[in-house]
Structure formats: structure tokens, C-alpha cells
Image (cartoon, rainbow, N blue to C red):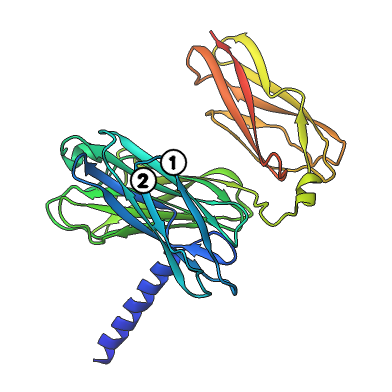
Amino acid sequence: MKNRLLMILASTFMLSCLDAAAQEKISSDITIDKTVHNFGDILLGSGPVSCTFKITNTGSKPAVIYNVTTTCGCTDVDWTKEPIRPGQTGKISVTYSNDEGPYPFDKSLTVYLSSIRKPVILKLRGVSLEKKKPLAELYPVRYGSLGIKDGVNKCGNLEQGGRKSEAVMVANLSGSPITVDFTDVSDNLEIKVTPNPIPAQSTAEMTFTVSADRNIWGKNMYWATPVINGKAQKGAEGNGMGFWAFTKENFSNLSDEERTNGPRPIFENSTYSFGKIRKGETVHAEYTFRNTGKRPFLVYKVNADACCWSHSSIPCAAPGEEVTFRVHLDTKDFPEGEALTIVTLTTNSPLRPIVNLFIAGWIE
């Protein structure tokens, strides 16, 4: 009896931890159970679908949901009108009409709260199908008997000090229930599958959350290996399941004066054109900027959407200082024809937290 009681207490504690992990902190005073609801695959004409977002006041003063706006008339929304007292939870109830056609849908809700400067964006996602399709066709990427639509999943933009969650659907492609766990999970990544176990030939929602880390900036990949009924499963290419997030600075606590007087880079040119070159040559793209702000300008990280590249060091630029740096691009894996590479800088500038630069030309 004592062992049974301990097991019950342990299970209760684990469930509480999962519920806490599912909460997404959107300010020092407000948490929300999710920012994305994925309806998965639904049949067109089967009727409207609904979901609820729960907002909890973790502060010391009442919070008010002033307004919730939608991107189109296909979405109806209702929300808690009375103030949400400290420790209490309010709701935003949403219904999608599901009558727009057999297409993927991605609808946004903009939520205005009394205790937050900028609005909160919520997402409704899913795919309306004209007729039912086999799960194996809808979820082609496999990890054993677990199917998913894509082996790399997007978490999107994440601000320092925060957490960002997304949700996708997964499927049990086998004829019996499966229990899904994960191993080799990257730091700052959490994953939860509901329901778990997943019934035979059924779908479940997989929620993944990335927590910001001041040692991590820009676009980064996070990984996890699915464990199905106790056995680790790799994908067809021998990889685990991938997730990416883009981490940028959080300027929400800055005053208007601090924003105005912050660092401000002005680039001489945002595009470097290399003309025509032979495949395999290395491009040395050069960029020059001046910090016209009143605070030092710092580049936290440089990303590029190319296979083989590097960059020179970019020193911290004092107010008024001019800096030149280079991006070195190996074109050996480029296809012939027109080429365009995007170079992304993650910075400490409130006015330009992300700077996109371009390398363009022709590969012969």
C-alpha cells in the first residue's frame, strides 16, 4: 500500500511538472497554456472546430483582456471580459468555420492585455481535407511507427528571457498503441505528446518548447531522438527529430528614450554583388557600417543560408565608429545560374535587432 501511494504521488508530481512546462510566460505577470493550437487534419464540411486558450494572471494586480482581433471573418472569438484577478485564469474561446476550401490554414489572433505593452499573437493551424487520406500519406516522415509531416519543425522567433512553444500533429501508423518518449534531447528543449500512449492508427499533438539562453543567439537547431515503446528510433537519414528557433534580444523593458538613444547601425550597402564567377570559387563579400547611435553596437551572431561559409570578426562598434567585415562564401555546392545568399545578423540594436544582408551573383 505504501509503495502504491508513493507511485501515485510521483505520478501526480510528474503531471504537475508537465502542466507547468506547458505554460508559456509572455510577461512577468502573465502566462498562457499555449500560443498555437493545431487542429491537425480535418474534413472540409465536417463543421466548425473550436479550441480554448487559458491566460493566467501570475502578477499582483488585476489584468484585463482589452480586445482580441482576428485576421478574417472565418474565425469567431469570445473572451473573459471581467478583470482576471491575481492567481486566476481567463479564457479566449475560438471557433474556426472550416469552410474555406481543402487547404492548410494558419489564422492569427491578436490579443491586447492591460499589463503588456505589445499584443500577444495566437495561432490556429490545421489542414482541411476534401476526403480522408491514409495516415501514412499524410505523415510521410517516419521514426519507426511514429509518423510526422516534416523531420525539421519550426519554433520561430524567441526573445531572451522567454520561452516559445509550437505544436504539430504526429501519427501512430501501427496497428497497436504506442508510447512515445524522447532521448538525447538538446538543452533548452522540452517535448510533450498528447495523448500518450497514442491509440492505433490515430493522431496526437506534439508540443515543443524552446527556452531562451543568453549563450545562444540567432537561428539554431535543437534535436531529440524519439523512443517508441522503449526503442530509440532514427529517421531515414539516420538523424533524430529536428527543431529550430531564432533567438533575439528582448527590448520590452526599455523606455522610449533608451530605444531612441540605443545603438543604430547604418550600412553603406546591404547587397554585395559578385558578378559572374565559376562554380567552386570563393566569394569575399564586404560590408561596412557606422554606428550612428549613442550606445555601443554589438553583433551577437551571424547566420547565412548557405552550406560552406565563414565570416571575419565583427568588433563592438563605439558610437560614431565605422566597421568593415567580410563574409566568405564557398560556391562549390551552389547550382549553376543566379545565386542569392541571405546573411542575418542578430544584434543589440532596439531599432534593428535583426539585419539582413545579401550576396548576389551568377554561377557559371
Asked where in the image residue 4 lies, by quadrant, the reply is bottom left
Residue lying at the far front of the rendered structure: 81
Which residue shows up at 45% across the image and 55% down it?
209
Q: Is residue 140 visible?
A: no
Q: Which residue is mark 1?
A: 71
State the image coordinates of residue 99 (x, y, percent, origin top left). Answer: 26, 38
Q: Which residue is mark 2?
A: 75
Q: Choose between 127 and 275: the one closer to the eye.
A: 127
Q: Is residue 280 visible?
A: yes
In contact (CB < 8 Å): disc 1 and disc 2: yes
State the image coordinates of residue 59 (x, y, percent, origin top left). Answer: 58, 71
Q: Amino acid at mark 2?
A: Thr
Residue lying at the far bottom of the rendered structure: 2
Where 320 sits versus 214, above or below? above
The crowding category of the residue bearing disc 1, from other C-alpha atoms within 10 Å (few below 14, some 14 to 19, many at least 20), is few
Q: Choose between 225 and 9: the one closer to the eye.
A: 9
Which residue shows up at 71% across the image and 27% down it?
326
State the image coordinates of residue 287 (x, y, percent, origin top left). Answer: 73, 26
Which residue shows up at 66% across the image and 15% down it?
273
